[in-house]
Amino acid sequence: MVGRVRTGYRKLIVRKRGQSLLFFSASLLICGLSTVLGIRFLINGNGEDSSLAGKAWNAGDYQTAYSLALKNLEKKPLSSFWLMMSGMSSFQLAGAQINAQDAIKYIDTSIASLRKALMVGAGPSSEARAKYLLGKAYFRKGPQYADIAVDFLEQSITESYTATDLYEHLGLAYASLKDYKRSVVAFTQALGSNPSDLLLLAIARSYLELGEQIQARAYLIRCTEISKDTSISVQARLLLGLSLQQEGDVPGAEREYLAALQMDNSVAEIYNALGDLYTDKGDTVKARAEWRKALRIDPTNEVSRSRLGL
């Protein structure tokens, strides 16, 4: 009798386990299909809200997408869909802020949401995207987070994520770490067939830090040729002048400084550079005149104050 009772109990356990296994397998199948079909919100969140959030995101209405994410995360704090939506939309909203403190608040929200999405599991493609955004978010948070930015950006590359600005941000992050060799490699990857003036300027800066003047000047010249942004052109000509002056080409350096002044005569650093150049030529009167011009633009400028003995 005891044996039969135990046998019946064992059959019941086996049947229950079989039902549980069947239910678990069915659940996995549904989850897999949902991810493949792009309807993960049927599991993770309210279908109507998910659809609205998707439409808002596609329309560039990041505030609505963000608000819907916050609303749904109150009910389902571990929903990978809403964590990703919160992370992505808050990152976009950070870029629209005028106040730096407001921008950092959104960046912090983005980082927290995206890291939670990685913890709960958002699927391979979403996780690669999350790491890419985390890399950008940490870079935007400040130079002290550049190492974390590099780590996440490198992970996203390893996971085959592609974005037009991925390598550019990786290069900038490496430059923040003063790893200029890797920054040049990343920037070169970012060049493509239509490089931006800002990217060319960044590459030139890295080459200057490496002491490779010829390569730096090549990128600076290219930058001045294609840039339509006055501030970028001025920076490029100033750096080009400094590089030429360092190499002993005083006339070439003066030409670049004066060209930069024609574009914008309110940059104190250009007058400081001209003052140093005239000092090298032995004309201290003209040098002091240039430093005074720099001081009138920026009374707290340490370089011009030091040169004038103030």
Image (tube, grey):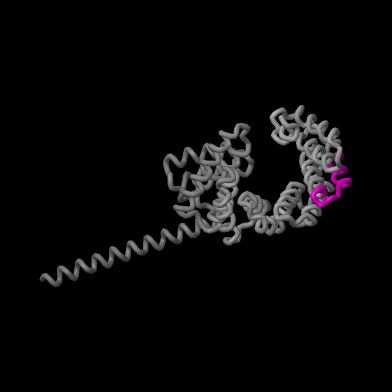
Image quadrant in which the N terminus is located: bottom left
| Residue at left offset 63%, top offset 40% | 60
Out of 138 and 302, give the one closest to the viewer: 302
Out of 204 and 191, give the one closest to the viewer: 204
| Residue at left offset 50%, top offset 52% | 40
Point out residue 91 in the picture as x, y percentages from the top left corner.
Answer: 58, 42
| Residue at left offset 77%, top offset 39% | 231
- Residue 82 shows in the view: no
Out of 223 and 280, give the one closest to the viewer: 280
Chief SS of the magenta region: helix
In this rendering, would 13 be left or right of 226? left
In this rendering, would 68 be left or right of 175? left
In this rendering, would 271 be left or right of 89? right
Residue 254 sits inside the magenta stretch: yes
Q: Residue furthest bottom?
A: 3
Image quadrant in which the C terminus is located: top right
| Residue at left offset 19%, top offset 68% | 8
Q: Which residues are magenta?
A: 244-259
- Residue 66 shows in the view: yes
Above or below, 68 relative to 179? above
Point out residue 178 in the picture as x, y percentages from the top left corner.
Answer: 63, 52
